[in-house]
Image (cartoon, rainbow, N blue to C red):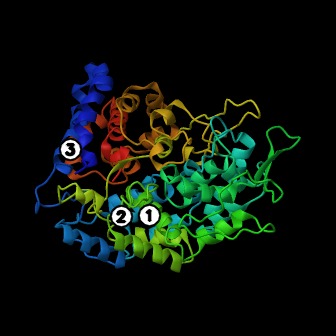
Amino acid sequence: MPPHPGHFFSSAFRLARASRFLLRAAKEISRAGVLAILAQSAAGLAAEKPAGAAPALVFELAPAPRPQGRIDELVFARLQQLGLEPAHGCTDAVFVRRVFLDVIGTLPTAAEARQFLQDQAPDKRAALIDQLLARPEFADYWAMKWSDLLRVKAEFPVNLWPNAAQAYHRWIVAAVRDNKPYDRFARELLTSNGSNFRVGPVNFYRALPSHEPAALARAVALTFLGERAEKWPQPRLDGMAAFFAQITYKPTGEWKEEIVFFDPDKALPAGAAPAQFPDGGAARLTPDRDSREVLADWLISPANPWFARVMANRVWSWLLGRGIVHEPDDFRADNPPANPALLDHLAAEFIRARFDVKQLMRAILNSQTYQLASIARSPQPAAEANFAFYAPRRLDAEVLIDALNQITGTTEKYSSAIPEPFTFVPDDARSIALPDGSITSSFLENFGRPARDTGLESERNNRITAAQRLHLLNSTHIQRKLEQGPKLQALLRNRTAPREVIDSLYLTILSRPPTADERRIVNARALAGPDGRTTAIDLAWALINSAEFLHRH
């Protein structure tokens, strides 16, 4: 059973004490309450509790969850079959933070969290889901996800170059923003022709170290079939590669511009294998038709058993942290789905909705399964694989730095080292909206942003490392944000009562008010004293180093 976020509180706090608080030993006594807060939280909120124990009310609700629809019926039936208990439902405070992070990659503001918590409408969760799916950040965040898979990167080994990377990214953002049906999205990626600087989706055929037909076939199989075609039998790979044998790359007079197009006059290699669909069916290719269109027709057909299943599994994985088939890009006969009936249902609903990705997300987000707490009630490893609880996972690098900037009112400076042309990124640009994987920073690299070299989901690394902990606990980068950030400083200036300071910090950082015990532990008198501002910053520092902040849970 993976640990609940609160399990990390006390260890993180010990490091904080070593790095920051001990440097201020002379002031330690006046801030003893701040030093104790996370240890108390760990004991009171996140201790492993035996089956049947009272729920931790900050994170989970008391009533046992009940299925709310077909998704829940299939998940709960599988759990019952395995002898596993589902977790309790999550609280509103957990839900508002979780759904903001999962849908738009953005932390709710204190005002947004407070408004949701005070709302008494019975359908407020469904209403919030609809609001988030319509927000502009949705396009930026999910374009970031797709850019990882589609290798949107200017530099080596992809070498799109900045103009092409930005054109590609703009097309992805527009497709997500307009909720382009997934079958059209895939078809345009597969069949587009034109300039890599002007027709974004043609870069699908350029965002690879090799432009050989077999390499293109492997990219298509990974992206749309969820299969790693390097493991296919050679005849199957050769049959797939034949669809791309007449793709041509033609340079223009503009630096690094290429025209990508299907050339019916391009001679096929001697002894080339005939085109064959991945399911073994023979393809009928004619000289007057782009062979990629033939493949696209087969791929996006509702009768194709793979296309909808793979995307439904990806969306489930993106929202719940784990695919029904795990990893989501490793479909194969000896890696079966944990819940075949659930995957079949999601794929059928996706097809019925005409490949509407937002509708698929809406169905998952409104399910009781998605809204379970992250505290498991069954210790068996099968509980996570069968979605008996919401699996905690560390925030993506881009989401984490954006959250820190939102809390403090600071920004990051990004630029590209490429001189042709130099890429300028405005100071107020969010990290989730960066258009090019070559534009990075030491923070993003340290916190596991993918290099976008492979198109594999696993290329992103969200495991917590010692270097990450040290950066959050003991770097001038984070210290300056907390001590000089205008938004955090305004929060401290405009709240005169210690209770207001504590409540505002909790709502801003953890999207919930403090519990009575937490409020008591924080020494209110210290916050009201002559060094109250420093103590409040120490509290903020402790909270951003808590696992409750660093994880979606």
Which residue is tagged 2? 337
Whole-percent x, y for residue 321 in the image: 38, 55
Neighbours of disc 2 within 10 Å: few (<14), some (14-19), many (20+): many
Numbered circle sitting on residue 313: 1
Residue 126 in percent (x, y) is at 42, 73
Helix, strand or loop status at disc 1: helix
Placement of the C terminus among the 4 image quadrants: bottom left
In the rendered structure, the answer to whether residue 315 lies left or right of residue 66 reads right
Tell me the distance, in whole angstroms, between the alpha carbons under discs 2 and 3: 35 Å
Specify the amino acid type for callout 3.
Ala
- Residue named by callout 3: 42
Nearest-to-viewer mark from 3 and 1: 1
User: Where is 535 relative to 112, above or below?
Assistant: above
The answer to which quarter of the image holds residue 251 is top right
User: Number of marks in the image?
Assistant: 3
Residue at point 19%, 66% (across, down): 85
Residue 132 pos. (x, y %)? 50, 64
Residue 126 visible to the viewer: no
The disc, 2 or 3, on the residue closer to the chain's N-terminal end is 3
- Label 1, label 2: how far apart the Cα atoms are: 9 Å
